[in-house]
Amino acid sequence: MGYPVYFAFEDDDIEAVLADVKRNDATGQLATATTGGYKLVVSVPEPKKRASPTITNIQGWLSGLKTDGDANQLPTIAVVASYDTFGAAPALSVGSDSNGSGVVALLEIARLFSVLYSNPKTRGRYNLLFGLTSGGPYNYNGTHKWLRSFDQRQRESIDYAICLNSIGSWDNDLWIHVSKPPENAYIKQIFEGFSNVAEELGVKVGLKHKKINISNPRVAWEHEQFSRLRVTAATFLNSLPFVNEAAIIKSIKLVAESLARHIYGHEGKNVQIFADNSSLAVNPSYIKSWLDLLSQTPRVAPFLSKNDPFILALKKELEDHTDEVNVQHEVLDGMFTFYDSTRASLNVYQVASVTFDLLLLLVLGSYLIVLFSFLVITTRGLDDLISLFRRPPSRKVKTA
């Protein structure tokens, strides 16, 4: 026999009930039919199993400048962030992190580079691929299927991928997680480029290397899905349990500036392309508005429909800042079983004890007796009232 478990945000009413229950527990007075207690009623239909839940990936392209002499495809840099959350209570799985900060950073970086790429004079000779992936808590299943949808030529054109994960929760320390050894030429180039910009911003960047096990389908980080297909990738993250808007802004400056210096060949040069006082400055208002939306929106992938307003908002935002947007819907590989009931109304009733019911019955009965007696006296007299309580005379049957 299974027992349902319900979750709710704390509020004054729930706190009052919990305090009363704890107070009774402390005194050893358990809630029984005699002592009273609380009755919890949840009105919701029986949950049904969700068949073939889907996940949605959204990608946007910024095409690089290709000259007449370029016979080959331009190299591509991918910026990726998983946008969905996970929780035992899907309707309550909100928050601006996991991975809200990464989503905000990706959108702002796309906005900044769209300004540069809108002018042929400042358009880089790299394609930029922005990917908002789903299924992050499920072994990055959406990233896996998104990459498998590319043909081999597209994958081989990716110079490297930057995966943004919880970059809004750090305090002057940011870590780069990689699968390839630090001695790898691409990894050294990425790390040195980011380290130089980080030093200018007054933060520290560290490198963590973890070799992936090809025989094990489970992955710890999003970049490992790229590494399995021999695509150089790195994950930027820190895991402090809070989100700091100032940290997000600094992270965006770090990633955008590092990418721009690589694209335009300014590595090692103290050239600020996204200076605070320029038209290419990071926009704090834009960042805050998206953080507010993400902090209030449940984003558990199997419960987001194809036309969910949140999905459509992400798609529209990429359409505003990139040349071409594609949406991919895939079936989530079976790791968990999901049920369709995610919201219900909880009614809490305070149940009176049996002692209270008996006392109320006694008072009510006494009141009715007094009222009846008063009515009889006023209408028929005291003698009639007394006669009601006298034993009626016995009737003797005469025998002949």
Image (cartoon, rainbow, N blue to C red):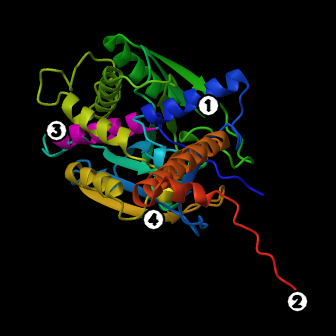
Q: Which residue occupies 54% across, 63% down? A: 340
The mark closer to the camera, 3 or 2, is 2
User: Residue under circle 3?
Assistant: 122
In the picture of the structure, the residue carrying the numbered disc 1 is 21
Q: Secondary structure at mark 3?
A: loop
Residue 65 picture location, percent across and down: 22, 48
Q: Which residue is mark 4?
A: 329
- Determine whether 332 is above or below 241 in the image: below
Question: From mark 3 to mark 2, how far is it between C-alphas?
Answer: 134 Å
Classify mark 4: helix, strand or loop. Answer: strand
Amino acid type, residue under disc 4 in the picture: His
Instruction: Quickly name the residue at label 2.
Output: 400
What amino acid is labelled 2 in the image?
Answer: Ala
First-in-chain label (1 vs 3): 1
Q: Which of pointers 1 and 2 indicates the residue nearer the eye?
A: 2
**Disc 4 and disc 3 in contact, CB within 8 angstroms:** no
Side (left or right) of 332 relative to 104? right
Closer to the camera, 240 or 327? 240
C-alpha gap between disc 1 and disc 3: 66 Å
**5, 249: nearer the viewer:** 5
The dominant secondary structure in magenta is helix
Which circle's residue, 2 or 4, is located before the other in the chain? 4
Which residue is nearer to you in this view: 38 or 120?
A: 38
Q: Secondary structure at mark 1?
A: helix
Q: Report how far apart the C-alphas of labels 4 and 3 lie in the structure.
A: 34 Å
103 in relation to 27, above or below: below
* Position of 23 relative to 66 (above/below): above
Percent of width and height locating residue 138: 59, 49
Tell me where the magenta segment starts and ends, as one range: 99-116
Q: Amino acid at mark 1?
A: Val
